[in-house]
Amino acid sequence: MPVTILIVVLVLLIFLIAIILIRTSAFLRPSEPVAPVELPEVDPDFVANHLAEAIRCETISHLEGTPADLSAFRELRRVLESQYPRVHASLEREIISDATLLYTWRGTNLELPPVLFCAHLDVVPVDPGTLDQWEHPPFAGIIADDYIWGRGTFDVKCQVIGLLEAAELLLKQNFRPERTIFFGFGQDEEIGGEKGAKQIAAHLAERGDRFEAVLDEGGVITQGIIPGIENPVAMIGIAEKGSLSLRLKAVAKPGHSSTPGKTTAIGILANAITRLENHPLPARLDFMRIIYSALGGAVSPTLQAAFANTWLFGRFLKRKLEASPTTNASIRTTTAVTMVAGGIKDNLLPASAEAIANFRLLPGDTVEDLAEYARLVINDPRVTVVPVPENAWEASPLTSPEGAAFQSLATTIRQVFPGAETAPYLVLGATDARHYAGLSDQVLRFTPLVSTQDDLSRMHGINERVHVGSLGRMVQFYMLLIDAWAGGELKRNPVELPTEAPGV
């Protein structure tokens, strides 16, 4: 009898291993070779000086409701006109709202739907308390140690300069696109894009424009950041999370602190916050499976097998991914209490206390569902839960990584950055791209910069900078991509993704 049981166990084990191996083999997408190309000639130092001059224009977006310094945007406009005379002589330029720029490069075949390249002109403020920690003043536009330093170098004036520099050089070569090309540069992406990208989108929609493809800022090329892969990886955003801010308000009887009740408005609110934090939304591995499938053989065999068989290893993967704030945010709708207010005097029981809880929504979770979820979790009639209208939007639609735009973009990335793998991913923050979702089925998010974890930590932080050589490579990338997207059909490298439904 024991021998029979052992045989059965061995057969089942062999059967299980076979299933794991078969599913792993079907899960992986092979990396197709790309034809080498000769990169166009670009002078990185020349481009660096252009970016440095743009950094000196303090185009800061402060908090919502605080007027921007439009003189800084006018100065930046003057700088761009001076730096790119061919662009401003050959392309049509419209000023939208106060300072948003929309360029139109007319193609020779107006029957073809156009493409749109995006970036933004504004930057976040610099905390005055950190000025002494900057190696170079944040708006001095200093070039030192092979870097351009300053606020906006990485996020994302480099992209504005990169696109215009590419267009200027292509015009110098008498390049003429077959497909019309738009450049859209918003003035307020850092505070939601209401006057910038949203107005560009409304303006284009009113004219009836639809786009073959849209490319905005997004993922970069990183190395050693994605668990289980050491190769450089270019992350192409195919969607971005939604956002919902809920105002939580707790009420209680006011009075003197010497005769308190069992709890106060602040205590009631604290309990509501604790319940929200202790009941996170469930984890979903859909997007991480897409990433690891696309990376194929570059992933460690252990993780290949795990993501190919989430029915078996899903719980292990979730625990592993939940350990890091970044990967945890990639697998669930997150909850973060970001603001609290209550009480006006130390001996006075407050009549109310308020907090703001911000959720970042995975595609599939809705604003309405999340608000109801929060009410059910808090489960306290003394606490009202109300969405903040200006801070509530759904996750963006998904762009297919099998589409021509994604495949053409991936091919160009691998031509310009040899050895880099490409993978679709979910953008965790908000970009201007979400405003264009109604104008194209192919909205992508990618910034062609090779970046370390240190580079990424400087964005919105101290000592923001971009490498001079990386900036030159960015211009080369845009020159090739503009050429690829300007033709009658978007050039693509035909690769099929697994058709297997998402796992756990």
Image (cartoon, rainbow, N blue to C red):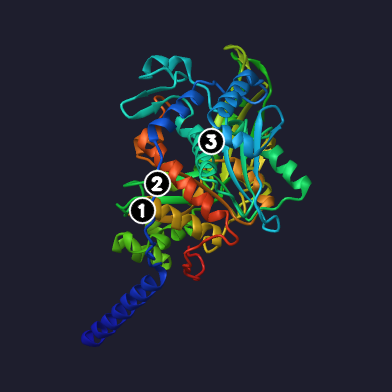
For the residue labelled by badge 2, is the local secondary structure a helix, a strand or a loop?
Answer: strand
Indicate the quadrant where residue 265 lies. top right
The amino acid sitting under disc 1 is Ala
Instruction: Quickly name the residue at label 2.
Output: 221
The amino acid pointed to by label 2 is: Ile
Q: Nearer the viewer, residue 92 or 155?
A: 92
Q: Position of residue 433 (x, y in %)?
A: 60, 44
Q: Which mark is residue 153?
A: none
Count of marks overlaid on the render = 3
Label 3, label 1: how many angstroms apart (C-alpha)?
24 Å
Q: On the image, numbered disc 3 is attached to which residue? A: 160
Rate crowding at label 3 as few (under 14), some (14 to 19) or many (20 or more) other CA atoms within 10 Å: many
User: Along the polypeptide, which appears first: circle 1 or circle 2?
Assistant: 2
The answer to which quarter of the image holds residue 77 is top right
- Of label 3 and label 2, which has the lower sequence position? 3
Between disc 3 and disc 1, whose residue precedes?
3
Farthest residue, direction right: 206
From the image, tell me which residue sits under label 1: 420
Residue 317 image point, x, y percent: 38, 57
Residue 119, position as x, y percentages in the image: 56, 38
Pointer 1 with pointer 2, Cβ within 8 A: yes
